[in-house]
Image (spheres, rainbow, N blue to C red):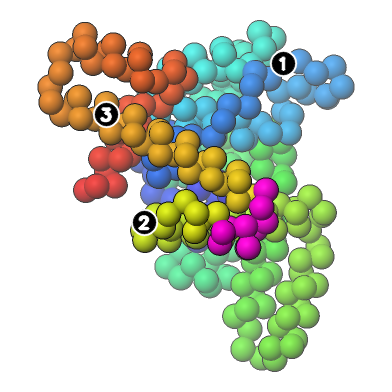
Amino acid sequence: MPKESEDSAAQSTAHSSAGVGRAAHQNGEPPALHGALTLDSAAADPLLAPGLRDELEAMLLEAGEAPDPQALKRRLAELVRLRFGEALRTRALALAERYVDYRVALGELQPPQDATDPRALRDVLQARDALRRQYFDETEFDALFADQQALDRYTLARLEIERNPDLTPQQRRVALASTETELDPQQRAERAQSVVQQDVGAQTAAFNAAGTDDRTRFEERSARFGNDAAQRLAQLDAQDRDWNARLDGYARAQASQTDAQALALLRDRSFTPQEQLRLDGALALRAASIR
């Protein structure tokens, strides 16, 4: 399924309004900022440019936890000001607020009882698309979601093929290969990249669980994904350890009931302004994972 959590109809969509902006990364670190969007004379509508939904999702992650949708929208107002050019801010904020309402409503949709049942999954996807059209007009829908239509059809086709008992293994392989050719080159590349990312994530999780040392990690990653990828993953490991070490220090200071002024100084000394925006959400996510 598509990468965003709200698009995975095979998973539970029961997101509460308070959790709409929750970071998906285990340690609470959201994706890098995309930078402010500005007017582009070459675009028919510069607001509805490629990457718009990624931008909205990134803002939700950066906004962190909020007690209710209205509080989340107030946080988004400041992020919109930082990310969007002046000519786009009013429309961008209105769109972001409707996106919050859509995500809250999405949480009320029931996931299929059997996530591998093509018919049940089709029903969920149709309900999701109908919900999207309640909040966005046709041009907004296309800008936000049209690129997923082929991926949705591809996913359903794969499930139907895999669940068809009348196909021989050879027929199934041929049918699956034929289905993948219906994706455009970019989607095929994205799918291949997604598979690699899943493999990397699973391997990293296994390394972390086993306490694998850096040398072994590098050797195994290099053999599987190549030397360049192994080097980049080693850098990410170092950044992840640094982030978690700073979170540990701040959490210990909170637990020891350090006075507010000293805690504020530690916060400023340990985290950049951008990191401070996501700090509370990261700590809350960490506490929830411990429970």
| 178 relative to 248, above or below | below
Q: Residue 189, image x and y in percent?
A: 75, 54
Q: Which residue: 66% across, 8% down?
A: 86
Tell which residue pokes out farthest to the front in this image.
215
Front one among 190 and 242: 242
* Residue at mark 1: 38
Residue 83 seen from this side: yes
Closest to the camera, between mark 1 and mark 3, is 3
Q: Does the magenta stretch include residue 257?
A: no
> In the rendered image, is residue 110 in sight?
no
Q: What residue type is labelled 2?
A: Gly
How crowded pointer 3 is (Cα within 10 Å; few <14, some 14-19, many 20+) is rated as some
Which SS does the magenta portion mostly show?
A: helix
Residue 40, image x and y in percent?
80, 18
Specify which label sits upstream in the sequence, 1 or 2: 1
- Residue marked by disc 2: 211
Q: Which amino acid does label 3 sit on?
A: Gly
- Which residue range is magenta in the image? 219-228
Decide which of 212, 274 is in the foreground and name it: 212
In the picture, residue 162 is in which quadrant? bottom right
Which residue was labeled with disc 3?
249
Give the CA separation, mark 2 to mark 3. 21 Å
- Mark 1, mark 2: which one is toward the viewer? 2
Along the line of sight, which residue is nearer the eye, 54 or 102? Answer: 54
Check if residue 226 falls in the magenta segment: yes
How far across and how far down the image is residue 29, in percent? 45, 35
Q: Name the residue: 44% across, 18% down.
A: 272
Q: Is residue 260 left or right of residue 98?
A: left
**In what element is the residue under mark 2?**
loop
